[in-house]
Image: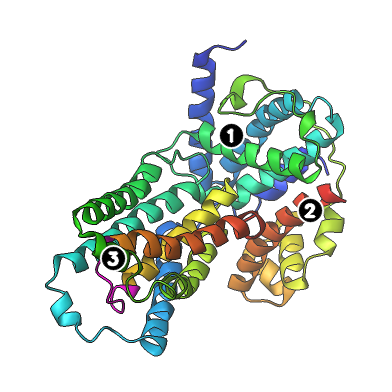
């Protein structure tokens, strides 16, 4: 059991990192996602005891959802509530799609215990990002491959894709949203 | 892919490129939808000929005030629902209040009326078309509000869809006040509310499918 003080300082620290990230600091943003993923892994391990193999896949889906929806975070609002709502949405969506709601050992009411336990044991997700990417149209796939996977700048990615810079940004944005839907839909297979 | 690599991928390149598109998205969706609904009203129905005279009647303002407060309440509800983890607060109460007030007014006016007047007060002259016309006028606004919600992050999809439908129905009702000659509270309490309920039910039906992210 960690104290409330610990949870509050985690909340403050992660919130600061996220706000720096939203202001354009990619390193702060990466640290935010990195530290958060340990907490989310703990949260998911606890709730998916019957489905241990799905933890890492779902964790990555939640991280992608947080990334795609980061513009919906309101700095006046507790970070915990925002993250919990998104994690719970993705968790329930997955369980509903798999019709496996009985696997849910604990009720998911309004418990905000995301930050109560961390699990640093990062693992490999089973899903293959490459297979999802192959399903995207080229104007979304190419910007993601060049900018997000190979790490090119917007200008370099635009040159490599033969697209305008704004088309590259839109391609990344829409492509990541499409990727989130593809990842969610795989639970029905 | 390892989660650490996945995180690095997410953070690369576009961490900060976040447009603060919150109210703007609703303004665009709602504005365009209302404009199309307005054209639909002007094109298929008529603005009531006695509008200038009606503007002086209190009941006209009761009608439009009912619709306007429902617009504000459902917009507040939709905005709250589209942001993960934001409590809906007083929005459900703010939605229920104008409906309850209208029903109360309807019951009181029925009690006060002579028995022979009651049926005409309930059915007016247009009960058969009124709910359908409101629902028809609501469709463009419904499309606009669903579009606005789909770009945000509602986590309760059925409720979010219903809030988009309610917002559309209330907006359509406000426009419909420019056309509809009915001025009796019992008529409004039944047929207007039914007209608003139709797009609301449609939203609840479509929300889980179209608002997913």
Above or below: residue A63 compared with residue A68: above
Q: Mark 2 — residue?
A: A185
Between residue A101 and residue A4, name the one nearer to us: A101
The x and y percentages for residue A149 are 76, 55
**Which chain hosts label 3?**
B
Badge 1 or badge 2: first in the primary sequence: 1
- B27 relative position to A137: left or right: left
Quadrant of the snapshot with the N terminus of chain B:
top right
Membership of B154 in magenta stretch: no
Label 1 and label 2: CA atoms lie apart by 21 Å
Q: Mark 3 — residue?
A: B121
Residue at 28% across, 65% down: B121
Between marks 3 and 1 in the image, the one whose residue lies nearer the viewer: 3
Residue at 29% across, 84% down: B47
Above or below: residue B162 compared with residue A48: below
Disc number for residue A84: 1
Between residue B7 and residue A44, name the one nearer to us: A44
- B48 relative position to B41: left or right: left
Range covered by the magenta-colored residues: B176-185
Quadrant of the snapshot with the C terminus of chain B:
bottom right
């Amino acid at each position: 059991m960690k104290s409330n003080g610990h949870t509050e300082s985690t909340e403050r620290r992660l919130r600061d990192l996220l706000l720096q990230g939203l202001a354009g600091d990619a390193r702060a943003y990466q640290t935010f996602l990195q530290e958060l993923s340990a907490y989310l892994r703990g949260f998911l391990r606890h709730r998916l005891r019957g489905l241990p193999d799905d933890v890492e896949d779902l964790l990555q889906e939640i991280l992608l959802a947080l990334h795609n929806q980061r513009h919906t975070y309101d700095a006046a609002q507790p970070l915990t509530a925002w993250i919990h709502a998104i994690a719970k949405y993705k968790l329930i969506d997955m369980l509903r799609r798999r019709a496996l709601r009985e696997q849910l050992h604990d009720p998911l009411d309004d418990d905000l215990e995301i930050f109560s336990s961390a699990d640093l044991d990062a693992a490999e997700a089973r899903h293959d990002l490459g297979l999802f990417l192959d399903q995207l149209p080229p104007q979304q796939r190419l910007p993601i491959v060049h900018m997000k996977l190979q790490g090119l700048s917007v200008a370099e990615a635009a040159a490599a894709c033969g697209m305008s810079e704004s088309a590259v940004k839109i391609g990344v944005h829409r492509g990541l949203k499409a990727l989130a839907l593809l990842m969610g839909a795989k639970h029905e297979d | 892919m390892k989660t650490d690599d996945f995180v690095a991928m997410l953070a690369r390149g576009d961490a900060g490129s976040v447009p603060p598109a919150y109210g703007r998205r609703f303004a665009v969706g709602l504005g365009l939808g209302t404009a199309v609904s307005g054209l639909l009203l002007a094109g298929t129905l008529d603005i009531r000929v006695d509008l200038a005279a009606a503007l002086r009647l209190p009941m006209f303002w009761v009608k439009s005030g009912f619709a306007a407060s429902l617009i504000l309440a459902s917009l507040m509800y939709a905005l709250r629902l589209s942001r993960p983890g934001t409590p809906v607060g007083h929005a459900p109460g703010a939605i229920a209040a104008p409906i309850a007030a209208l029903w109360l007014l309807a019951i009181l006016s029925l009690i006060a009326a002579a028995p022979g007047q009651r049926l005409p007060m309930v059915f007016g002259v247009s009960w058969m078309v009124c709910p359908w016309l409101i629902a028809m006028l609501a469709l463009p606004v419904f499309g606009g509000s669903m579009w606005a919600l789909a770009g945000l992050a509602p986590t309760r999809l059925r409720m979010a869809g219903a809030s988009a439908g309610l917002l559309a129905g209330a907006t359509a009702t406000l426009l419909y006040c420019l056309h509809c000659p009915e001025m009796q509270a019992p008529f409004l309490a039944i047929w207007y509310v039914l007209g608003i309920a139709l797009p609301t039910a449609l939203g609840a039906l479509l929300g889980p499918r179209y608002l997913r992210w």
